[in-house]
Image (spheres, helix red, strand yellow):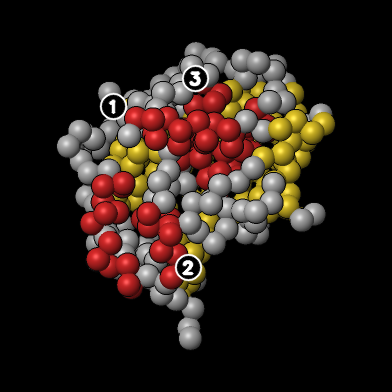
Amino acid sequence: MVQKSEALVADLLAQLDLEVLEDQLFRGISRNLGGKSVFGGQVAGQAMVAATRTVTPGQLAHSMHGYFLRPGDMDKPIVYEVENIRDGRSFAARRVQAIQHGRPIFSMLASFHVAEDGYVHQAPMPEVPGPEGLASHDELRHEWVDALDRVPESLREAVGREIAIDLRPVEPWNMLNPDKRAPEQYVWFRAKAALPADQALHRAVLTYASDFNLLTTAQLPHGVSFFTPGMQMASIDHALWFHGDLAVDDWLLYAMDSPGAQDARGLSRGLIFTRDGRLVASVAQEGLIRHRQG
């Protein structure tokens, strides 16, 4: 089990280790997580790596804002084109276009900042049980097998797909047999194996992991999921703010809520805390949650 976890994390790091094609031009590979197109977190994480490789050492990403423009083709590489928008003494900005088949599939603007002292305040961490004793997603999916006949055949592989991130929901939600509940959820997560001590890499991995479960939060009041027949779901945009150094190979709590859904779109928000209650990131995302007729 340990060897498998290490292999999954090594594969994720390989995805984030982009090939250099030219100055400010990179190429990344994709992995099939069982969906119909490239996982949005993968594209955002790779775009973050591409942008980071073009800034001055010591400048770390403090925010990113991205739009998912087209579905990604899992069978083809993705080219990342970085544009230098600004280099200042404290801040730097980069625009990244992820390109496939000659067209952008994702567009991101990221800002980088050198470390500075300043005023500090934060929202309190929710009081929830710790990750120890909670069932992981890998364990929960075995409990869902009896409901596989309700899932479109094209999506059944996604149920059994293992990933490099250990996800442990405080209150599990069966995506194959969803009930209706309040639009909020709490999920502990971490990489399944140790990562190199590189803060820029940890922020790229967090960008990748921040796309898990977020859109799901907007589905909770409606009793539907990605696996519900007729549902069409996709991330539309994604914003992420880093508030301080973090370690994605240690437990982090993702506290998510959805303030509203309308016009086939749902808005989800998230706060990410360390085990000791420090707020290290904030997230917001709007996603498509459309039920197709016929």
Work out whether residue 178 can be spotted: no
Camera-side residue of 39 and 106: 39
Tell me: 51 left or right of 118: right
The residue positioned farthest toward the bottom in the image shown? 294
Q: In this view, does 271 lie above or below 87?
A: below
Q: Which is in the foreground here, disc 3 or disc 1?
A: 3
Label annotation for residue 275: 1
* Quarter occupied by residue 248: top left
Q: Between marks 1 and 2, how big is the CA–CA gap?
A: 38 Å
Camera-side residue of 246 and 240: 246
* Residue type beneath disc 1: Arg
* Residue type beneath disc 3: Pro
Image coords of residue 91 (percent x, y): 66, 23
Tell me: 169 left or right of 80: left
Image coords of residue 30 (percent x, y): 60, 46
Q: Which residue lies at the image location 62% right of the left edge and 59% below the top edge?
A: 71
Q: Which residue lies at the image location 49% right of the left edge and 13% below the top edge?
A: 117
For label 1, the SS is loop
Q: Which residue lies at the image location 54% right of the left edge and 62% below the top edge?
A: 36
Q: Name the residue under label 3.
A: 196
Q: In this view, does 106 lie above or below 52?
A: below
For label 3, the SS is loop
Q: Between marks 3 and 2, how big is the CA–CA gap?
A: 36 Å
Q: Name the residue under label 2.
A: 154
Q: Are marks 3 and 1 in contact (CB under 8 Å)?
A: no
Q: Which residue lies at the image location 50% right of the left edge and 31% below the top edge?
A: 10
